Image: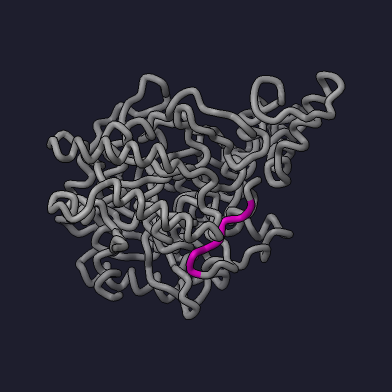
Amino acid sequence: MPLKPYESLAGIQRDLAAGAITCRQLVEHYLQRIEENRHLNAFVAVYADDARQRADEVDARWQAGTAGRLAGMVLGIKDVLCYEQHGVQAGSRILDGFVSQFTATAVQRVLDEDVIIIGRQNCDEFAMGSSNENSAFGPVRNAADTSRVPGGSSGGSAVAVQAGLCLASLGSDTGGSVRQPSAFCGTVGLKPTYARVSRWGLIAYASSFDCIGPITHTVEDAALLLEIMAGPDVFDSTVSRNPVPAYSQNLTLNRPLRIGYLREGVESEGVDPAIRQQTLGALDWLREQGHTVEPVDFPLLKHILPTYYILTTAEASSNLSRFDGVRYGFRSPEATDLESLYKKSRTDGFGDEVRRRIILGTFALSSSYYDAYYTKAQQVRRLIKDETDALFAQYDLVASPVTPTTAFRIGEKASDPLQMYLADIFTVQANVVGCPAISIPNGTDNEGLSIGFQLMAAPFGEADLLATAQALTEREGALA
C-alpha cells in the first residue's frame, strides 16, 4: 500500500514509534516517487542502494532506542556539497567523473543524527543562476507547472521537497539561492547568518557570501536542521563560536516585535499585484497579533544588486581558477600544450553563465579597474551593512516579498541576463550583509503559482526569525 505523503519529521517519527512504517518503507516510497517524476530532472544521482542500507541501520537503532534526532528524515543534497565516495559536479561538465574524498561538515552532522541521504540534486552550474536553467544536466522543472522554472540555484533541491521526492533538502544560498526557489515552489527556505554553519565541503562560488541552508515543508524541520548543522568547526576558521540555541524547541513568540517592511516591496510597479496583495495580507495579520508593523525606506536598495554581482563575480573568478583541467575533472582532448589545456578545458568545461561571470570578475579585479569596481563595491557593501545595522537598531525583523514575480516560464529570461538578475532584488541584501533570512509560503496567484514571504533578522537573530515564521506558516495552514 502506498505511504501517505509526509510533510514533517514529527509526523514520520510518530508513525515510526507506532510501528506504522519503517525507514526502509520510507526510502522505497521516495525512490518510487523519484522514478515517477524523472521528468522534473530534480536529481542528478540517486543513491538507492546506499539509502536502503542506511535505512535498515536506522531502523535497527530505532528499535534499540539509540537512533539520532533525524531518524526517519530522507534528505537530498545539492550538487555542491561533498559526500565521501560519492560524485559531486556543481552542475558542471568541468567536474565530470569527480568523486569526493571527504564529507562536508554540515552533511556529516546530519548523518551523525541518522539522516538518510537519497541522492544528489540538480542545480545551476556552480550555483550561478536564478532559474536552474544553467545546469550541464539540463533544466529542472517546477512541479506545479512543468513549463516554468523552479528558481535557482537550488532548484532541484526545492522541487524535490515540493514534489515529495524527499522530506527535506540541503541547498546553498549566495544571493537567494535557497529562498528564491523556495518561494517559487511553496516550501520553507532558510538562509542562516553568515558563519553560523561551516562551509567546509561546500564547493565555493563566492566565499564571503555562500551559506548552506535547509529547504523543508515546515519551519520546525528547518530549525532542527540548522540547530544540528550550526556551530564551530576545526576545518573552517570563519565559523562563529557563538553558542547554538535550541531553535526547534523555541518556536513560540512570547513578546510583540517591531517589524519594518520594505516600502519598495509593496509599492513598486515591478512587483506583481498578487504578490503585493499577499504580502500586505501577511503584514496585516502580524499587526492583528500585536506586533508593530511599519514601512521602511532603504535608499541603498538600488545599489545592492550591482554591489553583489561585482563582488561575487570577482570571488568566483578567483575560486574557479582551480578548475584548470590539470588535477581533476574534465580535460580537453584537443589540448596540445599547457596553455591550450587551460583554455580548451575551461572553455568547453564551463557553461555560458559561468564563463560570463568569470570574465566579469576578472575584469573587476584587473589592475586598471580594481579600484574603480572591486574597491568601490567593497566600500558600498560597508555602507549597505551600516544602513542595515541602523535598520535593525529600530526593528527586530524586516519583511518583504521574496521575489517580484512568481515562477516565470523556462527560457523566458534566458536571453536577458539583467532581467534574470533582477529576480534577486529582495534576497541579496541578506548575503551582502551576512544576515539570516527565511522564505515561507504565502499563498498563490490566480494561476496557482506559489508566492513567498521573506523575513530578515540581524546577525544571529534566527530565534525570532524562526518563531515569527512558525506563526505565519500556522496562519497559512489555517487559511488553506
Residue at 29% over, 59% down: 6
Is the residue 394 above or below the residue 360 in the image? below
Q: Is residue 56 left or right of residue 443?
A: left
Residue at 52% over, 63% down: 142
Residue 102 on the magenta segment: no
Image quarter in which the N terminus is found:
bottom left
Question: Considering depth in this image, is 94 or 465 the residue closer to the camera?
Answer: 94
Residue at 41% over, 63% down: 186
Residue at 59% over, 50% down: 305
- Displayed quadrant of residue 259: bottom left
Q: x and y percent of residue 150 in the render?
A: 53, 60
Q: x and y percent of residue 341 in the render?
A: 80, 24
Q: Is residue 23 left or right of residue 413?
A: left
Q: Is residue 335 visible?
A: yes
Q: x and y percent of residue 104 in the render?
A: 43, 30
Question: Considering depth in this image, is 64 or 387 the residue closer to the camera?
Answer: 64
Image quarter in which the C terminus is found:
bottom left
Q: Is residue 320 left or right of residue 84?
A: right
Is the residue 41 above or below the residue 75 in the image? below
Residue ranking furthest to the bottom:
446
Question: Considering depth in this image, is 383 or 437 the residue closer to the camera?
Answer: 437
Q: Is residue 385 visible?
A: no
- The segment highlighted magenta reads 138-144
The number of numbered discs placed on residues in the rendered structure image is 0
Q: x and y percent of residue 258 in the render?
A: 27, 58
Q: How is the image coloured?
A: one colour
Is the residue 386 above or below the residue 255 in the image? above
Residue ranking furthest to the front:
1
